[in-house]
Image (spheres, rainbow, N blue to C red):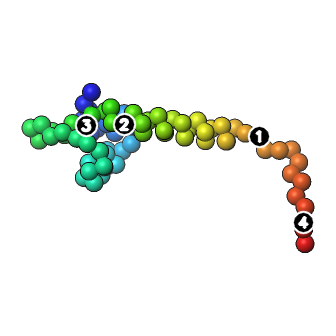
Amino acid sequence: MYLSPQETADYLDLSLQDITRLIREKQIRYLVVDDDIFINANQFTLFLKERDKYIKELQDYLNTPLPEDIDVKDED
């Protein structure tokens, strides 16, 4: 499945400027057809999986309750 830069930005929840920068820096693969740029969406599978994993780990960390009584001793 090939997407335009704007569709790719929406798909990855990034700004169009970020996608343009990644294209310019040759960090993502793309095709040029009649002066139109197309990006293969399958190359972002690992990125999306890792991002979802990171978001889940962050939410788990943020949802972990703080201990009631932190026993901190001054060792001076």
| Disc 1: which residue | 65
The residue drawn where x is 49% and y is 39% is 51
Q: Which mark is residue 12?
A: none
Estimate how packed mark 1 is, as few (under 14), some (14 to 19) or many (20 or more) residues with alpha carbons within 10 Å: few
Between the residue at mark 3 and the residue at mark 2, the CA separation in whole angstroms equals 10 Å
Q: Amino acid at mark 4?
A: Asp
Residue 47 placement: quadrant: top left
Whether residue 6 appears in this view of the structure is yes
Between 66 and 42, the residue placed more toward the observer is 42
- Of helix, strand and loop, which one carries label 4? loop
Between 10 and 52, the residue placed more toward the observer is 52
Q: Earlier in the sequence, mark 3 or mark 2?
A: 3
Q: Earlier in the sequence, mark 4 or mark 2?
A: 2
Between 43 and 24, the residue placed more toward the observer is 43
Between the residue at mark 2 and the residue at mark 1, the CA separation in whole angstroms equals 34 Å
Q: Residue furthest left?
A: 34
Between the residue at mark 4 and the residue at mark 3, the CA separation in whole angstroms equals 58 Å
The quarter of the image holding the N terminus is: top left
Q: Is residue 36 left or right of residue 47?
A: left
The residue drawn where x is 90% and y is 72% is 76
- Of helix, strand and loop, which one carries label 3? strand
Q: Earlier in the sequence, mark 2 or mark 1?
A: 2
Q: Which mark is residue 74?
A: 4
Q: Residue furthest top?
A: 1
Q: Earlier in the sequence, mark 4 or mark 3?
A: 3
